[in-house]
Image: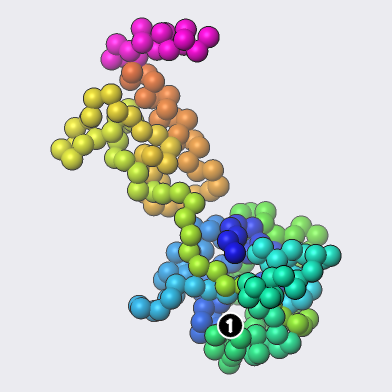
Amino acid sequence: MNYPHLIDRGKPGVIAVTARGNRFGNEADSYHGFMRHLFAAIEPGAEVAAWLVCDHRFQRRYGLGASKPFPVSLKRYQRSGYLVTAPTIEELARRCGIDPAGLKATVDFYNRHAREGRDPAFDRGGTPYNRVSGDPDHKPNPCVAPIEHGPFHAVKIVPGSLGTFAGLKTDAAARVLGNDNRPIPGLYATGNDMSSVMGGHYPSGGITLGPAMTFGYLAALDMVARGGAAEMDDIGAAAD
């Protein structure tokens, strides 16, 4: 079952752990940053995967991944194996293939501070980006709550792709460059087709939109400057 975990990670009362039972980063960060932390935490040769872990109170209030909150039944998700449920944290770990002692220690440490709305390990909820995906009605931290009301639930997550940073190389006019770094006549690229001006970073949501509009405009200016005005008029007339 596929589900894009874009916002649920920021809700109060869920953590992400590796097979060792350890947290590896701020769950409320962007999906790009979250996965970079996961890749860095996985040992060479091991499966790149993590588990979102929460208690029953969290699942019934917010849902967990594709499993819907109350009043939708959980049985369908549990029967398929998508949602793993157990009466204790240790048993949940065993059913998921997570180290039980590691997960128990992680949850205990997290809970000790989460009861006060704090996350000394990764400062979850410490930025506006974090808080916008949290629960504004949960105080004092919209992104942090303890995991302590069983049964407990987990969903396995693996890397996916929403786009690319590795598009076509272009110049300042959005002209596509060939292997000799010279513009290919008549060929332009913008948006996700263009190699990202962010250099592999993800400053915020919708970060492809601004460059797409900007370089689309620059490409049009270049086309006009190269004598394409008449052709563009023809295209406009045909569209009318």
Q: Is residue 236 above or below residue 19?
A: above
Is 195 a magenta residue? no
- Quarter of the image for residue 141 reads bottom right
Q: How many marks?
A: 1
Disc 1 marks a residue whose amino acid type is Cys
Look at the magenta stretch and give its main secondary structure.
Answer: helix
Query: On screen, 132 above or below 35?
Result: above
Q: Position of residue 118 (x, y in %)?
A: 68, 72
Q: Position of residue 189 (x, y in %)?
A: 36, 33
> Which span is picked out in magenta?
224-240
User: Is there any visible trace of residue 203 in the rendered image?
Assistant: yes
Q: Secondary structure at mark 1?
A: helix
- Which residue position is annotated with label 1? 96
Crowding near pointer 1: few (<14 within 10 Å), some, many (20+)? some
Residue 135, compared with residue 120, is above or below; it is above
The one of 137 and 187 positioned closer to us in this rendering: 187
Residue at the outermost left position: 180
